[in-house]
Image (cartoon, rainbow, N blue to C red):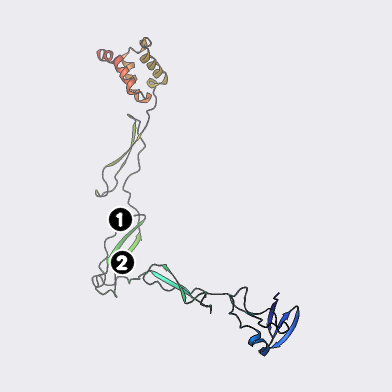
Amino acid sequence: MLLSITFLIASAESHYFHTDGVAHHHDLASVSGPTWSSWTSWGNCVGGQKIRTCNCLSNDSNICQGVLTEKQICSGQIWSSWTAWGECVGNKRTRTCDCISPDTYHCRGVLSESKDCLTIVTLPPPTTPGAIWSSWSSWGNCAAGKRSRTCNCISSNSNICQGVLEEKQDCAEEIIWSSWTSFGDCVRGKRVRTCDCLSGNPSVCRGVLSEAQTCTPAATPQCSTMAMYSLNACLNFQPLCFSWWNVNHLRQAQSCFTTWRYSPAYINRFNNLFGNFMRTQG
């Protein structure tokens, strides 16, 4: 059975190793050569240490046994820290980190990372109108408490100016429309409210805005639920119509059809029953 031997460096000329718990000393001449194999390559850095080994090649256990192990302190870091982000060029900026591991199996060269950015061009203010920059345009309409005006670069030399300058200032928005009126009465299932144009500029607004919404007319004494039940009974059983042979009552009932939500079939039944009577009694 092979025993693991921990190899400790005592000096440049000698080695110590343990076998069966007993420390033995050999000079390098006795370790190198045919007695021991060549050292393996250094292993990966784990826990701040890396290891290499060599094996006993001798059949004489009094000379050597098992495996020699050598440990060396190391750094497990493979890549350097990222550099600071570079300047924004072509709407991109970049940072890099370098491979700092001597083992090309782990890494080599440089890592590069980029992200989008906005290139800001700072333009000089206008100088003499007509020379480099045009005159300012008129102020635009007030929107969200701001209005703006612009001037254009009129120089053919892009090193002097480029594009458009914009200036903004606070403003009070013009009141264009009046407040809405209250909704009016419910007429034929609709009620209306309005607002008026207050601007003196007819290209902005003119006249009156109108808004309508559906509604249900409020019940009146003539459109009471009791009157609806009475007319329903009459339309379904004519002997119960004795109190409805009155033109005024019938016309009041017609004005209640929307309130009562009469169906077309009920309205036709009403007209078939009372139509001639109402025309002759006029």
**Residue at 46% in and 76% down:** 110
Q: Say which residue label 1 marks.
A: 141
Q: Position of residue 105 (x, y in %)?
A: 52, 75
Count of numbered circles in the view: 2
Q: Residue 245, position in %: x, y?
A: 33, 12
Give the residue type at disc 1: Asn
Is residue 254 visible in the rendered structure shown here? no
Q: Nearer the viewer, residue 244 or 135?
A: 244
- Above-or-below relation of 127 to 185: below
Q: Going by the image, does 185 lie left or right of 18?
A: left
Residue at label 2?
165
Q: Looking at the picture, tell me which residue is in the foreground, 121 or 236.
A: 236
User: Residue 128, relative to residue 216: is it above or below?
Assistant: below
Quarter-of-image position of residue 154 = bottom left
Upstream in the sequence, badge 2 or badge 1?
1
Residue at 63 percent across and 88 percent down: it is 33
Quadrant where the C terminus lies?
top left
